[in-house]
Amino acid sequence: GGKEKKKKIVTNSHLKKKKKKMFLKKIIILRQKNLDAGKMAEQEERQKIPLVPENLLKKRKAYQALKATQGKQALLAKKEQRKELPAKHSLAFVVSLQRIDGVSLLVKKTITRLHLKKIFSGVFVGHPLSLKMLRIVEPYVTWGFPNLKSVRELILKHGQAKVKNKTIPLTDNPVMEDHLGGFGVICLEDLIHEIAFTGKYFQEISRFLRPFQLSMAHHATKNKVGFF
């Protein structure tokens, strides 16, 4: 008779092996997909730019603008290098540096009011309006802000009183008491204290003193506290 076709016999063990192989292949594919997805997510995370809330951004810009403005102001102040009169200083010692020939009438009047007509003469200035006047005569004078020690040394070394157009030494306590006793000043130490701390009767007591005649302008140094 004719040849019979041989049937391929598939055993159970072969089927199991095939299924296992396919299963493992699926697992490998899934793992690879998960790995790729993880890498992509990590890359996206790195590329993310943190979002700054609008109000924080505005605050940051405002702060940067403020710092820039402050920097410019500090630079301008440094360039000007002008003498300031800090509010905390109520007493200044002012010294005339040069003659005032050919100056404006306002400068002349201010110098006269400050009693600084003579070159290298010095006076204590304690009234706020008088301190403001220093701006008018700034090129012709210099000043410093003396402490108690400096005031005492100035008065002891150079201090003289003016009584009826006469010059008297400040060691004369009876004369001092006669003229300043009504202001609570009966001795030299009282006078020094009233000048140094710009007491209630500072104007009256300072007028009792003659302008200090200094031999050199270095007796007053610009913008120094206690300039001795």
Image (cartoon, rainbow, N blue to C red):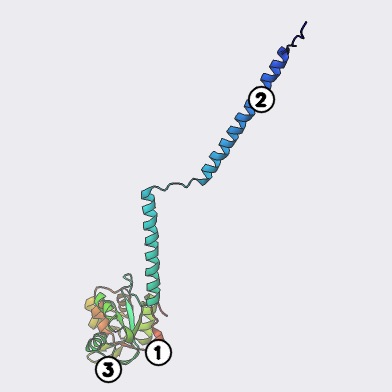
Above or below, comparing residue 89 to residue 25 in the picture: below
Pointer 1 residue? 216
Nearer to me, 207 or 24: 24
At horizontal 62% and vertical 30% (from top left) the residue drawn is 29
Measuring from the top left, give residue 12's x and y in whole percent. Answer: 71, 12
Nearer to me, 104 or 200: 104
From the image, state whether disc 3 or disc 2 is nearer to you.
2
Marks 3 and 2 in Cβ contact (< 8 Å):
no
Measuring from the top left, give residue 163's x and y in whole percent. Answer: 24, 89
Pointer 3 residue? 102
Under circle 1, the secondary element is: loop
Above or below, comparing residue 80 to residue 215 in the picture: above
Measuring from the top left, give residue 178's x and y in whole percent. Answer: 23, 83
At horizontal 30% and vertical 86% (from top left) the residue drawn is 172
Give the mark count: 3
From the image, state whether disc 3 or disc 1 is nearer to you.
3
Could you tell which of marks 1 and 2 lies nearer the N-terminus? 2
Could you tell which of marks 3 and 2 lies nearer the N-terminus? 2
Q: Amino acid at mark 3?
A: Gly
At horizontal 56% and vertical 36% (from top left) the residue drawn is 37
Pointer 2 residue? 24
Q: Residues within 10 Å of mark 1 (few under 14, many from 20)?
A: few
Marks 1 and 2 in Cβ contact (< 8 Å):
no
Nearer to me, 81 or 32: 32
Q: Residues within 10 Å of mark 2 (few under 14, many from 20)?
A: few
Q: Amino acid at mark 1?
A: Met
Q: Amino acid at mark 2?
A: Leu
Quarter of the image holding residue 31?
Answer: top right
Task: Tell me the distance, in whole angstroms, between the alpha carbons under discs 3 and 1.
Answer: 23 Å
Describe residue 107's horizontal placement relative to residue 97 as left or right: left
Under circle 3, the secondary element is: loop
Image quarter of the C terminus: bottom left
